[in-house]
Amino acid sequence: MVEWPSKIDENILNDVLNFKNIIQNKLLESRIEVKSAYNSILITYIDTIEDINNEVSALKALYSSKKSSKKTNFRQWKIPVCYDETFALDLDEISKQNNLSKEAIIELHSTVVYTVYFIGFLPGFLYLGGLDKRLNVPRKSMPRLHIKKGAVGIGGNQTGIYPTESPGGWNIIGNTPVSLFDPSKEPPCFAKAGDKILFVPINLKTYQDISTLVEAGVYQMESEVTDG
């Protein structure tokens, strides 16, 4: 485990992803699996490590080089979200707690370009950084047993989307009709750490129209290449 300062910070994320890229490109012949999170990288060795000190020294040397041999292209994705009361289970409560109108909450939530820090908890669950501080709200003291697939929620200083139905304690403010995880595709999740996300408000009619396209397998999410 390689760790950075314990905070959500885009500079740290860039350093984490750069080092992850270096490891994956420089250690191609090694049988390893590399996973990143907000402020850490976990390197899992498939084979037995003969000398842990040599491995640590090699990793430190790679980090000191600071030269990634392969540039990573990132994308900004536009995810449609319906904030209709049909889906916004906790919008009223957040409005009262944070002294904001529902319209203000939706505007604040959908005008920020979020950064994908990592994917976890559930396959396709995007951990996003960049939530406006005015929308910070604690996770629910009593989690729900069933959160609808596509539910968009806020938990503390984070926002995210439930890719499948599951239990969950985040405050639900909307729903997206798009699929975040499809095991039949490669890669199964359209986004990756370092990508950007913009939520685009849609009405209930548009939500239903997009749902039909998604079910037919013909919906294409809008995206564009960014500088990261």
Image: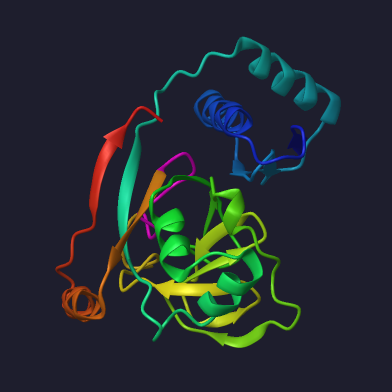
Which quarter of the figure is the N terminus placed in?
A: top right
Against 46, residue 166 (above or below) is below
Q: How is the image coloured?
A: rainbow
Instruction: Give whichever of 103, 178 is nearer the camera.
Output: 103
**Residue segment shown in magenta:** 187-195
Instruction: Give whichever of 186, 168 is nearer the camera.
Output: 168
Q: Quadrant of residue 117?
A: top right
Q: Residue furthest top?
A: 65
Instruction: Give whichever of 58, 220 is nearer the camera.
Output: 220
Does the rendering let one see residue 176?
A: yes
Percent from the top left, x then y, of residue 62? 64, 17
Against 163, residue 53 (above or below) is above
In the image, residue 215 lies in the stretch drawn in magenta: no
Does the rendering let one see residue 51?
A: no
Give me the residue at 36% from left, 79% from top: 84
In the image, residue 189 lies in the stretch drawn in magenta: yes
Q: Main secondary structure of the magenta part?
A: loop
Percent from the top left, x then y, of residue 147? 53, 83
Which quarter of the figure is the C terminus placed in?
A: top left
Give me the residue at 38% from left, 73% from top: 83
**Residue 21 left/right relative to 150:** right
Give me the residue at 40% from left, 83% from top: 85
Percent from the top left, x then y, of residue 14? 55, 29
Against 147, residue 105 (above or below) is above
Instruction: Give whichever of 176, 38 is nearer the camera.
Output: 176
Q: Quadrant of residue 70?
A: top left
Q: Quadrant of residue 180?
A: bottom left
Give me the residue at 67% from left, 12% from top: 64
Against 165, residue 188 (above or below) is above
Q: How many numbered markers are drawn?
A: 0
Percent from the top left, x then y, of residue 155? 63, 64
**Residue 29 left/right relative to 142:** left
